[in-house]
Amino acid sequence: MSDDLRHRPLGVFDSGMGGLTVLRALHEQLPGEDIIYFGDTARVPYGTKGERTVRTFARQDAGLLVRLGVKLVVVACNTASAFALDYLRVTFPVPVLGVIDPGVETALERTRGGSVGVIGTSGTIRSRRYQEGLLAGRGQHVGLPVERILAQECPLFVPLVEEGMMGTQITRLALEQYLAPLRNADIDTLILGCTHYPLLAEDIGGFMGPEVTLVDSADALARAAAALLADRNLLRPPDHDATTEGGAGRLSFYLSDIPWKFAEIGERFLGQSIDDVKTVGLDEMEAAGQILPADMQE
Amino acid sequence: MSDDLRHRPLGVFDSGMGGLTVLRALHEQLPGEDIIYFGDTARVPYGTKGERTVRTFARQDAGLLVRLGVKLVVVACNTASAFALDYLRVTFPVPVLGVIDPGVETALERTRGGSVGVIGTSGTIRSRRYQEGLLAGRGQHVGLPVERILAQECPLFVPLVEEGMMGTQITRLALEQYLAPLRNADIDTLILGCTHYPLLAEDIGGFMGPEVTLVDSADALARAAAALLADRNLLRPPDHDATTEGGAGRLSFYLSDIPWKFAEIGERFLGQSIDDVKTVGLDEMEAAGQILPADMQE
């Protein structure tokens, strides 16, 4: 790995393929950076699983990226951000960014005096991290009173997206079931608190109506990553030894399993086909979780 | 563990909680036997994941049960049965039973000259194990011509059951989407090729009509387990040192994660509440997969 930290890649991990929406935003925001994506497809989903399990997985995921020499770890998965962000920050000697704070900050910036809703997996919603962030305030923005914060877990949305059921009557019924209470409340902003949900943005927007602003944390997170890299002088210099045509950063993909619908799901999230995927064995994941901070010091 | 093999427990594993339907059938068929259930709730589901990953998980799951001293391993998970049964049989020195052969045999016994359908996860259906079994024949029954075998993957059924959405309009639409081709064909028998599907039996039966016989492999598997134990003189003697009132076998539960809806989902599958659950760490799972046949010899 490069001695000059600035030349190192960014690392992004997610429970599966959903984080490709975050990868896309990062690549758009920071086109010159190499980015390594890891999706824990062998153990997806995280959103239904307990805190301790998610933390163990997240430690292994981040450990793998750190072993690959990344200069920044981006936690694309909302559930992992909810349960493991602080833990990863004290465990690894590289900066770690999660999706929740950028999402909260964007929502506080966009709301116009109504309530703010947040939807996510069972784990994300039950962790209460979004709700606490909205209550406490973030960045330049003060928090909201508790009665202006609404949260709803939507467990069927992930399988519906993975099945490509956007725009179907089944999805419409699921929206009705989960989102009717939010639509009936005085919501003006809705945080899409799961990397899968941006693919349902059209369905959700159609159901909630045009007066509700949807917040996708991916763009806010990409801006936060760019700011952090600039702040710490970690941006890749434009005169770097470009490995791709036109100096665009290279995207690399690691997965712990090649799922049955890999090509189809990958294209759905990334908007382009994924070439050159490396698979990571479970034994390697276990080993990555054993890494000690001392092993990684420069 | 007991020196007398007959006093040892049976072991059942599943990718998650769905295998509790199999545990229930085993307990009814063999009320005097102690049974250990392991659900790999940290890594559920298996049905969307690739063959190599499922095989690695299954090796760890079975290894854990063998370490706990079971006299028989029952693979309740259809996907694990499809990808790992032969592998487990050559790996471990205890008998291993899967759900697929009993299901195939029952379907061949029940069909009345029409076609036989099978529904399951992507992995189970794409493995073609059910289709090959129906083609080749099982037990006393000859196989079917290929045009009398229909298979359909139904990826939304598992999340619908886990959400408790039996009997809802969403489930009705999913049935329509997946099962209409089977209903339009000349099906007289339908194999429920996933441990979650018996909970949808009423919905599926209502959709397919009363002339279609639904085959739940759990009962057939329990009968096969009883026959195997009798055949090998492994049935627990009635005069054993009973650990529970009335001499009923004891049920023990091990899970790799306590999911958010554990109590609710457990009760749904088992029909009773689950007490005394032990959690198994991922490091223990990894270690269980490392076990060598030589370590387990008597």
Image: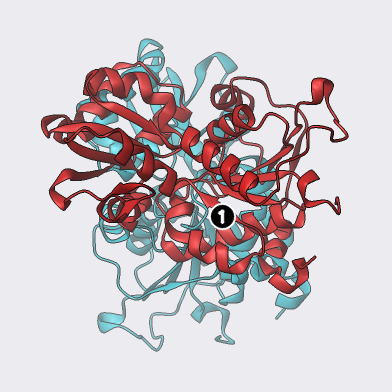
Chain colours: A cyan, B red
Q: Does residue A141 sit above or below B74 in this rendering?
A: above
Q: The C terminus of chain A appears in which quarter of the rendering?
A: bottom right
Q: In x, y percent, where is residue A128?
A: 61, 30
Is residue A209 among the parts visible in the rendering?
A: no
Query: Of B62 and B162, which appears nearest the observer?
Result: B62
Q: Which amino acid does label 1 sit on?
A: Leu
Is residue B153 among the parts visible in the rendering?
A: yes
Side of B215 where A68 appears, left or right = right
Q: Residue at x 75, y 27 (%)?
A: B275
Chain holding disc 1 = A
Q: In x, y percent, where is residue B152?
A: 25, 43
Q: In x, y percent, where is residue B145?
A: 16, 51
Side of B201 where A85 appears, left or right = right
Q: The N terminus of chain A appears in which quarter of the rendering?
A: bottom right
Query: Of A26 and B136, which appears nearest the observer?
Result: B136
Q: Which residue is drawn at 30% across and 67% down?
A: A274
In the orientation shown, which residue stands out farthest toward the top? A184
Would you identify the image quadrant in which residue B204 lies? top left
The mark tally for this picture is 1
Q: Which residue is drawn at 27% across and 21% down?
A: B172
Q: Residue at x 40, y 32 (%)?
A: B197
Q: Mark 1 points at which residue?
A: A97
Side of A136 where A19 appears, left or right = left
Q: In x, y percent, where is residue A10?
A: 49, 69
SS for callout 1: strand
Query: Of A14 and A164, which appears nearest the observer?
Result: A164
